[in-house]
Amino acid sequence: MTSLSRRLLLSLSLAALGITAAGAKELPFDLSPEQPAREHIAANAEAIAAIPKDFPFVTPGKFTIGTNPSGPPLATYASDTATVVGADPDIASLIAESLGLELEIVVVAWADWPLALQSGKVDAVFSNVGVTEERKEKFDFATYRQGLHGFFVHNDSPVQRIAEPKDISGLKIVVGVGTNQERILGKWNELVVEAGLPSAELVYYDDEGTKLLALRAGRVDVMVQPHAQLVLIAERDGDFRKVGVLSAGWPERSDVAATFRKGSGLAEPVAIAVNGLIKDGVYGRTLARWLVSDEALEESRVNPPGLPKF
């Protein structure tokens, strides 16, 4: 990918969140390539001992991961339009250090991550991949975050909490057409009607800026989309607040995981490494630095129950 393409991708990623290039400096976290606040960790002997003796790392001495830098705070290009930064790269860096390796990041398009793994281009993928039963047939997983959507309102809103279907009764909620949030809230509306309550009205707008304007103007009550995106907007703008979170796999739990070739043997040492990070506290501090503490796991698991096939 050329430098011009990277600059364009960074601009598009920020614009998708209603952030102009001029406003990028106002982001509530550091997008410098140096990342001086990035945490570090000593090698984890237990995790290193669990690595298969004959594991064919793409590059000896390095942990090569694939990621898609599609937007902050999970993964994006730094201000140099070359370095990939964000919560996922930070966690991957800590895991690499735990395994006694150096992190190497390969940028892959979302649609190409399975091929990148299967072809041996990368050792693992850290790209907001959710665990599903279908994916488990071809890949192994070690979880490192929860997959969440967020309910956000304007600061002046009377809505204080959304935790279950009845809480959306009578509200106007902006969602994206064809999104997972639309599917889930459609199911919630069915439960609301079954309970004899007024259903929520799902409202659709074409772009992020229009959604935010509608929320500010009171034309809608609630905005629902991936949690990390909304946390960023709320922190940046200061006039939105979170009133709840929703599992991206509702009614099932949705875990985000490092992804590996099936049977490679690397999922277990990575899970041990993540659990070491959790115990040390560096894991929690890293997620907090990128404003996604709500997505923290209590422990990493290898191939946990995934979202069912639809």
Image: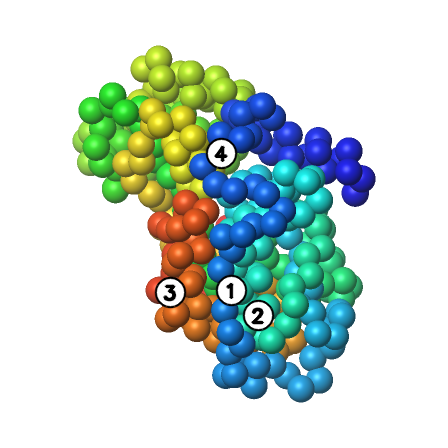
Image quarter of residue 214: top left
Residue 43's place in the image compared with 80, above or below, is: below
Q: Element under label 1?
A: loop
Residue 50's place in the image compared with 144, above or below, is: below
- Residue 281: mark: 3
Q: Position of residue 286 (x, y in %)?
A: 44, 55
Please name the amino acid that badge 3 sits on.
Gly
Q: Nearer the viewer, residue 255 or 136?
A: 255
Crowd class of label 4 (few under 14; some 14 to 19; many from 20; radius 10 Å): some
Residue pointed to by mark 2? 97
**Mark 3 and mark 2: span between their CA atoms?**
15 Å
Assess whether mark 1 and mark 2 are in contact (beta carbons under 8 angstroms). yes
Residue pointed to by mark 4? 27
Please name the amino acid that badge 2 sits on.
Glu
Q: Element under label 3?
A: loop
**Res. 268 visible in picture:** no
Label whose residue precedes the other's in the sequence (3 or 2): 2
Crowd class of label 3 (few under 14; some 14 to 19; many from 20; radius 10 Å): few
- Residue 40: mark: 1
**Mark 1 and mark 4: span between their CA atoms?**
23 Å
**Mark 2 and mark 1: span between their CA atoms?**
7 Å
**Mark 1 and mark 3: span between their CA atoms?**
11 Å
**What residue appears at the point 71 percent right and 31 percent down from the top-left corner?**
8
